[in-house]
Image (spheres, grey):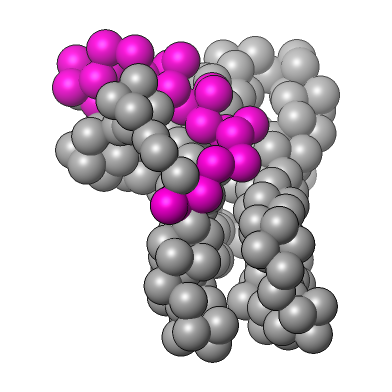
Amino acid sequence: MILTTHIYAVIELLPREVVLKNTLLALVLVCFGFVGLSRLSCPNLFTIVYRNYFSNKAYDSTLNDSEKISPFANVMLILNLIISLNICLVSMVYSTLEAELLIKVAFFVSWTYLFLCFISHRLVAVIFEDKYFGRSIGMFTQQIFNFTGLLLLVLALFALLNDSYKVWIQYLVYFVILSLPLAKIIKGVIYANTNNYRRLYIILYLCTLEILPVVLLWHYFVGKI
């Protein structure tokens, strides 16, 4: 009787796992569609995204056409980042939560963090009273988001199609996610030091707009799962 009950439970749960995995794979295809559309509007997309990620050029520097991405392509890449980040969080996290609740938690955390990143450069411009600093931080954020989204999309596909390497891919996913705020901090600090901003302002900027949100959201996410 106990064995029969256990087998029935396994059969009942298996379709849910299959449906979840198929749904995530469908979302991966949607993300590839977003990347494909952005590639059509910007033929040198991948070269520009890679080069801009490692570039420290500020907003007021001279940017030629080979260093720019169209607004449409940026929107497509941001949508790819949002969906790819959620796919990675849902597929890689071993949680006791039901799939629906885990998706809601991951969606809330990722959206909250990305929203804070989008408004932080505007707050920086007000605090430092320097619109070029705020615009440079915004440009750095966009560059990091574009590159990170492409990496997470590839890792999401590998994670869903290679269960045997899922543990190793998980470490890569966590590394990429952690490098998202770290790269933004490094670029911001380099820019602030280059332009001789007060160190007190730099510390306040890092603590309130970069480090604190990450710590609070990570604590919330880990506490929920």
> Viewed as shown, does residue 57 lie left or right of 142?
right
Image vertical order of residue 192 relative to residue 129, above or below? above
Residue range corresponding to the magenta coloring: 38-60
x and y, in percent, of residue 155 in the image: 60, 24
State which quarter of the image contains the N terminus.
top right
State which quarter of the image contains the C terminus.
bottom right
Find residue 2 and report its image quarter.
Answer: top right
149 drawn magenta: no
Image vertical order of residue 203 relative to residue 118, above or below? below
- Whether residue 141 is visible to the viewer of this picture, yes or no, is yes
Depth check, front residue: 77 or 162: 77
> Viewed as shown, does residue 71 lie left or right of 25?
left
Image vertical order of residue 27 relative to residue 5, above or below? above
x and y, in percent, of residue 179 in the image: 72, 44
Residue beneath the point at 19% across and 38% down: 72
x and y, in percent, of residue 102 in the image: 55, 58
Depth check, front residue: 81 or 65: 65
Marker count (numbered): 0
54 drawn magenta: yes
Residue beneath the point at 39% across and 27% down: 67
